Image (spheres, rainbow, N blue to C red):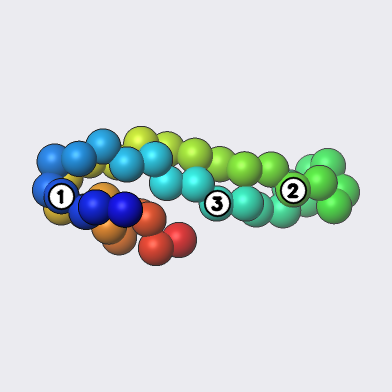
């Protein structure tokens, strides 16, 4: 996977939703630019 500045990234992670017991949900968001590599480390 290449990491070029300005490239669009979609960062995802799974987290436990306490309001639904032990159900795990995936949260995703799109990041751009030099900071994208930071979000992808989650």
Marker disc for residue 38? none
Q: Is residue 39 left or right of residue 14?
A: left
Q: Is residue 7 left or right of residue 17?
A: left
Q: Which residue is drawn at 42% across and 46% down?
A: 11
Q: Which residue is drawn at 15% across and 50% down?
A: 4
Disc nearest the viewer among 1 and 3: 1
Residue pushed farthest front? 1
Q: Where is residue 41 in the image (x, y as percent from the top left)?
A: 39, 63
Identify residue for label 1.
Answer: 4
- 40 or 27: nearer the viewer: 40
Q: Residue at x 30, y 60 (%)?
A: 38
Q: In this view, does 37 lie to the left or right of 29?
A: left
State the CA–CA distance, disc 2 to disc 1: 31 Å
**Label 2 vs 1, first from the N-terminus:** 1
**Label 3 vs 2, first from the N-terminus:** 3
State the CA–CA distance, disc 1 to disc 3: 22 Å
Considering the numbered disc 3 on the image, is that residue within a helix, a strand or a loop?
Answer: strand
Identify residue for label 3.
Answer: 13
When asked about the image quadrant of residue 6, the answer is: top left
User: As displayed, is residue 18 above or below residue 9?
Assistant: below
Identify residue for label 2.
Answer: 24
Q: Are marks 3 and 2 in contact (CB under 8 Å)?
A: no
């Amino acid at each position: 996977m290449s990491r070029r500045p300005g490239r669009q990234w979609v960062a995802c992670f799974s987290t436990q939703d306490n309001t639904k017991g032990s159900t795990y949900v995936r949260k995703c968001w799109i990041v751009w630019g030099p900071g994208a590599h930071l979000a992808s480390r989650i």
